[in-house]
Amino acid sequence: MTDFVTLNLDALPEAVELPSYDRSALKPRIAHIGFGAFARAHIAMHLHETLAETGSDWGMRAVELFGSPERFDMLDANDRLYTLVETSDEGKSTRLLGALCDTQHVARDGIAAIIDGLAEEDLKIISMTITEKGYCVKNEHLDTDNELIQHDLANLDAPKSAIGVIVAALAKRRELDRGPFTVMSCDNLPHNGKLTRISILEFAKTLDAELGAWIEANVSFPSTMVDRIVPALTDESIELVSEVLGGQTDPNCIVCEPFRQWVIEDNFMAGRPEWETAGAQLVADVEPFEEMKLRTLNGCHSFLAYLGFLAGKETISDCMADPVFHAEARKLMVDEQRPTLDVPGDVDLLEYADMLLKRFSNSQLKHRTWQIASDGTQKMPQRWLNSVRWHIENGSSYRHLVLGIGGWMNYIKGKRGGESYEVLDPMAGKLADIVSRFSDDATHYVDALLALDEVFPKDLVGNDDFRTAVHLAYVKVAAEGAQRAVEALAD
Ligand code: CS2
């Protein structure tokens, strides 16, 4: 039985900031699919600040297509207000965010209500954080082998994937003559708008060429670069929030770092909130920002996640506290990612890298290496492999990147010393099969992983130097341990 804790706003300490705008005027004009920790702390926070600056009526509806509706019930019980604590080694600040004005959960409200909601006249934007796997894309095309996609193509009245749900809603908008619309991805993928467009258009055109043509003419797909470190909520963070709330508990709270950045391609077919009033950068081309962030921040995160986890480090700040990991993380960004990038005009990549290391060092965050290690098959291509290709073409060294790959190949075996842990990945079944069949023999094991063409592009796998480097990196981590392998990078 859920314990519905409701906040007593009158009893909150003075330092806790409440929304300054009229929440009763908000209408659901943006629907956000995937209202997890990141969306609460980033997308909804920018909207909250925009509302405070502009007093507009752009409210947000949170939509969830998976899991249990309990979290949404708890949000509703608190009038959809929740606590955001920004914390660092320099201090904390706390506020209640109020941009959310509605919630819909598939298990509670049903898929028909969600599709109807997405087709409402006032609703002008679908935004989403559905993680890399949510796009159902393989090699830059809709993955028609994906079970959810197969299901949705046959059942558009009851779709399960975000892609199927959005196409069903767009079909309805077309039928009701609702006019232009925007679908905005906020996930860590390069050219995320373009990928969303490909996935949605290929899906729609498979069903109905005219629907595809309507979407092409009426829907825009801006790309965005989103950045804020938001660890999953833990009991420890709930306790921390309770301290700042003067002893009250907010089950919907979220704890994150103070830093945030949002770069958005200014390409909206039916209006948008004035997010620039909340510090967002509206630009013509997001790609240089996306690539910079994906390769340096996320690329470094994944390097620290696999090698740090295997070396017994539970959090990213634990990795940063080890001078060897700190120094090699910087080299990964500066020596191996920087040359591959077309850095946005006014950014100094050395300063950017140092700022990232400082953010990673925030000891208040407890950002678990195990959390970041999830979904490696979906993350490695854009974080590491495109850079590896650049180095192969330019004849330069990529030894940190390849050690990361060797780290991942060890990590997915699910064993650290005598301890087992869960490997989360949409391809976990396939990976576990390879581990059980081949991991006794390093050569066969690495070959079997490199043969996963969803992950490792053929041109890389066909390169002998790359194959050899991956084999050596895997064996090094397996034989000497991740700590020694990272130390050896310093030689
Ligand atoms: C992390 C990201 O879990 C991960 O894969 O690298 O969630 C990272 O914290 C964010 O992209 C920071 O903006």
Image (cartoon, helix red, strand yellow):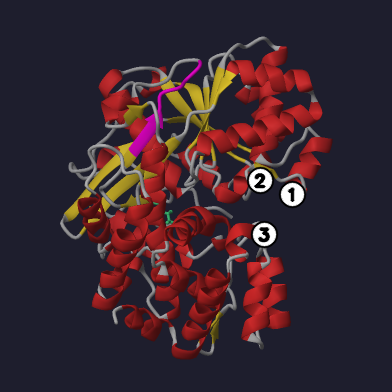
Mark 1 and mark 2 in contact (Cβ < 8 Å)? Answer: yes
Where residue 124 sits in the image (x, y, percent)? Answer: 52, 19
Magenta residues? 262-269
- Please name the amino acid that badge 1 sits on: Asn
Q: Is residue 99 left or right of residue 86?
A: right
Of tags 2 and 3, the one toward the viewer is: 3
Quarter holding the C terminus?
bottom left
Instruction: In the rendered view, tell whether residue 265 sits above or below residue 483.
Output: above
Q: Residue at x 38, y 52 (%)?
A: 340
Where residue 195 sits in the image (x, y, percent)? Answer: 58, 38
Task: Give the labeled residue for mark 1.
Answer: 146
Task: Give the labeled residue for mark 3.
Answer: 453
Task: Give the labeled residue for mark 2.
Answer: 136
For this rendering, which residue is in front, 18 or 58? 58
Decide: few, some or many residues near mark 1? Use Cα within 10 Å; few <14, some 14-19, many ≥20: few
**Mark-to-mark CA distance, 2 and 3:** 15 Å
Q: Quadrant of residue 163?
A: top right
**Mark-to-mark CA distance, 2 and 1:** 7 Å
Where residue 167 sits in the image (x, y, percent)? Answer: 69, 29
